[in-house]
Amino acid sequence: MISSKNKAFSEYMNEWLYGEDGYYASYKEIGKGGDFYTAVSTSKFFGGTIAKHIISLVDEGFLHQNATICEIGAHHGYFLADVVQFIYTLRPKLLTTLNFVIIERFDTLQTQQTQYFADSFGDAVSVRHYKSLSELKCKNAFFIANEIFDAFACELYYKGKTARVEEHEIKFDVEDTWVDAKAKKYHKDRGEIARGYEEFALEMANAAQSFEFMSFDYGEMAARPDFSLRVYAKHEVIPFFDENIKRSELFGKSDITYDVTFAHVKDAYEEAGVVFIELKAQMVALIDMGILELLEMLKENADEKIYAQELEKVKMLIMPNFLGERFKMIRFRKNI
């Protein structure tokens, strides 16, 4: 039995992020006033581009007009609300048939999201909550997530040993056959090994008879050759193994994350019977899905100053030196 002072790193990270006083247990501001930026906090056209893609899936017949549109880990609810707003702009009739769902484990965030939707849409749009994908059962769905796989708890691995945590100190002296097998599979002699991808993929596979799943995150298909674990605090990036880091002070009060090994995500979904479609840089994915066409629509219908403001925000989403290249879009389908 692992004591509270001596635990696997994945347990430690879970407590840091999702414990009773964990970082994500209550609402955190994202963007300029928070600890980090996301694509959602950067521009509404991120959600707008997803809305355009959803409409294209309805037009091609993969998504039904009464499909479930489900965001996983919605935080404040901005992303799904932006999707809804652009569906209203582009194809308003779909708002009367589509079903909107959020997967959110925390009651406080569910309340925030419900209130935000009520403030934004009144009675015109309703959103239903589930605490996990295992509670959801539907025929046809589109699942969307932004920066979710980097928030799964991970184990730390170094030259055949798995880490444990004792009083916020990291000690590599544990034998773990599961972690060792994953490290060998992804050719890592050090770094992070995510826990939970397999269970998550299986839950999604069982939640809908047919679906498309799209997620955006930072990382690469192949595993990094070193540790990428880091802490974000007021837009300062602190390497987790920095000798000056004060983990006890940062614990639960800042975000902790790492680069995603998309090969691990891909394998987890394929093992669950879901088909991998593609992995693309965010800038390529957003352009392919029509973000520039949405900007052209804005240019034709809005004041020049508003267009210029939104154009600058969209540039942050697609420029290689900001979010465009480092972030990737991964896409899967079940029952194509």
Image (spheres, grey):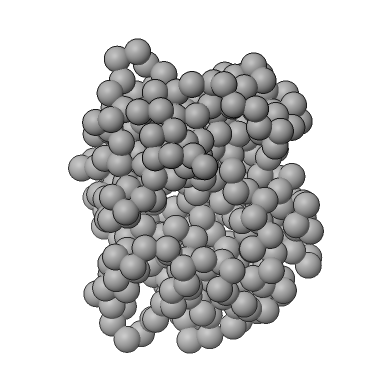
With 256 as the anchor, is 332 left or right in this view? Answer: right
Instruction: Say whether residue 54 is visible.
Output: no
Above or below residue 303? Residue 121 is below
Q: Is residue 151 above or below residue 303?
A: above
Q: Residue at x 36, y 28 (%)?
A: 168
Numbered disc total: 0
- Considering the image in quadrants, where does the C terminus appear? bottom right
Q: Residue 304 or 157: which is nearer the viewer? A: 157
Left-right relation of 297 to 261: left
Is residue 139 shown above or below 233?
below
Q: Residue furthest top?
A: 243
Camera-nearest residue between 304 and 213: 213
Residue 302 sits above or below residue 23 on the image: below
Q: Quadrant of residue 119?
A: bottom left
Residue 21 as seen in the image, left or right of residue 223:
left
Query: Residue 54: horizontal and vertical position, in percent?
Result: 57, 66
Can residue 46 be seen here? yes
Q: Is residue 306 left or right of residue 170?
A: left
- Residue name at image x 74 percent, y 45 percent: 267
For this orientation, the residue located farthest to the left is: 33
Residue 312 at what x, y percent from top left? Answer: 34, 41
Q: Position of residue 68 (x, y in %)?
A: 56, 75
Q: Residue at x 57, y 21 (%)?
A: 173
Residue found at x 75% / y 57%: 272
Instruction: Using the image as rendered, state which of residue 98 and residue 71 is in the foreground.
Output: 71
